Structure formats: C-alpha cells, structure tokens
C-alpha cells in the first residue's frame, strides 16, 4: 500500500514506485480481479512501466481505489493483524517480548505514508 499510496516524504521512495516496478501485490491482484475489462487493460498495460509519470500513477491509484481494492486490502491487513495479535496473546511469552512483538506488528501494519 505504501508503495502505491504512500507519501514520498514519509516512505523515502518515489510515489508509485511499486507500480513502476510492476510488483504483483495483493493490492494489485485485488484491483485486477475487481476491474472491468478496460480497467484491467489500463492497470496491466501500465504496471511495470519504469517511465510511468505522475499522471499515470494518479490514474492507477484512482482505478485501484474505485475497484474497492484499497478498502479490501486495508480490511485484509486488519484481519491478519488481529489474527497475529490474538496468536501472540495465546502463547506463553515474557511480557517484554510479547510487547515488543505487538509493537512491531502494529508499527508494520498501521503506519501511513
């Protein structure tokens, strides 16, 4: 998500880099699955184009969001995070170790770019 929608000042990499690199992420797969033929053609035609300009990134972001893929991905992240946190709560760990793992899970999944 950060590689498509992240703020470069926060992520340290150019906006849309994952699109330019053609990364086949859950976000992209969800968008492809939910797109109509024209949307799939646009997304797959520009995905992996190293020359994709800012306007192209914006078009692909809008497409991804309009398909519901962004919301679906956010829901998936929340579900998997909750599952991981529940698993941590169920195992015997030292308090400090458990808290470190909880903090890491939250930092990795709830940050915004």
Image (cartoon, helix red, strand yellow):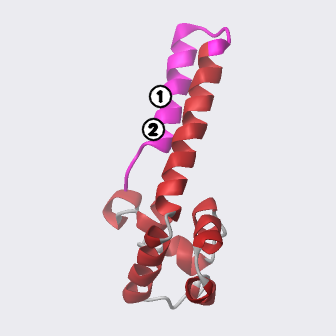
* Of residues 107 and 78, the one drawn nearer to the viewer in this rendering: 78
Reply above or below: 105 against 3: above
Q: Residue 95: x percent and y percent? A: 53, 9
| Placement of the C terminus among the 4 image quadrants | bottom left
| Picture disc at residue 103 | 1
Would residue 7 be found to the left or right of residue 2 on screen? left
Pick the front one: 3 or 58: 58
Residue depicted at 38% across the width and 85% down the height: 54
Q: Which residues are magenta?
A: 90-113
Circles 1 and 2: CB distance less than 8 Å? yes
Residue at x-position 63% and y-position 84%:
44
Outermost residue, front direction? 36
Residue 2 in view here: yes
Q: Secondary structure at mark 2?
A: helix
The crowding category of the residue bearing disc 2, from other C-alpha atoms within 10 Å (few below 14, some 14 to 19, many at least 20), is: few
User: Is residue 110 inside the magenta stretch?
Assistant: yes
User: Residue 100's x, y, as percent?
Assistant: 51, 23
Figure quadrant of residue 29: bottom right
35 lies left or right of 16: right
Residue 91 position in % (x across, y down):
68, 13
Residue 107: which numbered mark, if any? 2
**What SS does tag 1 mark?**
helix
Quarter-of-image position of residue 53: bottom left
């Amino acid at each position: 998500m950060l590689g498509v929608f992240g703020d470069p000042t926060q992520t340290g990499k150019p906006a849309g880099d994952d699109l330019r690199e053609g990364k086949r992420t859950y976000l992209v797969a969800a968008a492809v699955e939910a797109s109509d033929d024209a949307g799939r053609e646009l997304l797959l035609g520009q995905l992996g184009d190293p020359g994709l300009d800012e306007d192209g990134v914006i078009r692909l972001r809008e497409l991804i969001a309009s398909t519901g893929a962004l919301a679906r991905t956010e829901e998936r992240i929340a579900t998997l995070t909750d599952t991981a946190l529940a698993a941590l709560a169920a195992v015997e760990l030292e308090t400090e170790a458990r808290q470190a793992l909880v903090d890491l899970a939250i930092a990795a999944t709830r940050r915004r770019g």
